[in-house]
Amino acid sequence: MINAALFPQSIINLISDKFVCQSIHNFLDKFCAPVDVVTESSCIAVQRGNSEVSCLSVSDSSECAIRLAEGKADFGVFNAEELLLINQFYPSDIEPIIQLRHRTKQLGSRKL
């Protein structure tokens, strides 16, 4: 399982309020990055240095789900609605592993 602590801060900020899902078929670290969520420069930053994560650019979250189910990607980001829809098509192939939230939206940090 991918350790969420290994995500670069820029990616965590970019994908806040999303769920990170991991294919259960592979144990590689290939990040599925929809172009509407992850910019090309962010993808390059993920792969910089001795990173164990490579970035696979895809057109949208649907293609990301397909790549996860096929085992061509190892993790990706989805919002809650996308995740519910994906579960209808791939109930046993894609598994949520963490929910990322912006620090201002963390549970327990709300002020009444």
Image (spheres, grey):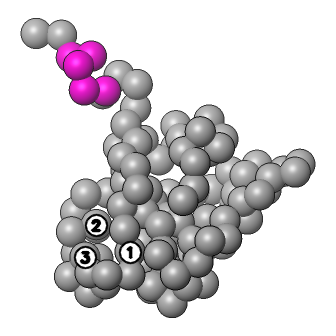
* Sequence-first disc among 1 and 3: 3
Q: Residue furthest right?
A: 49
| Mark 3–mark 2 CB contact (< 8 Å) | yes
Residue 107: image location, x then y, percent = 25, 26
Mark 2 residue element: helix
Residue farthest to the bottom, as pictured: 70
**Residue at the far top in the pictured view:** 112
Q: Earlier in the sequence, mark 2 or mark 1?
A: 2
Q: Secondary structure at mark 3?
A: helix
Disc 1 secondary structure class = strand
Mark 2 or 1, closer to the camera: 1
Magenta stretch holds residue 109:
yes
Tell me which segment is drawn in magenta.
Answer: 106-110
Q: Give the label on residue 94, or none.
A: 1
Mark 1 vs 3: CB contact within 8 A: yes
Residue occupied by mark 2:
83
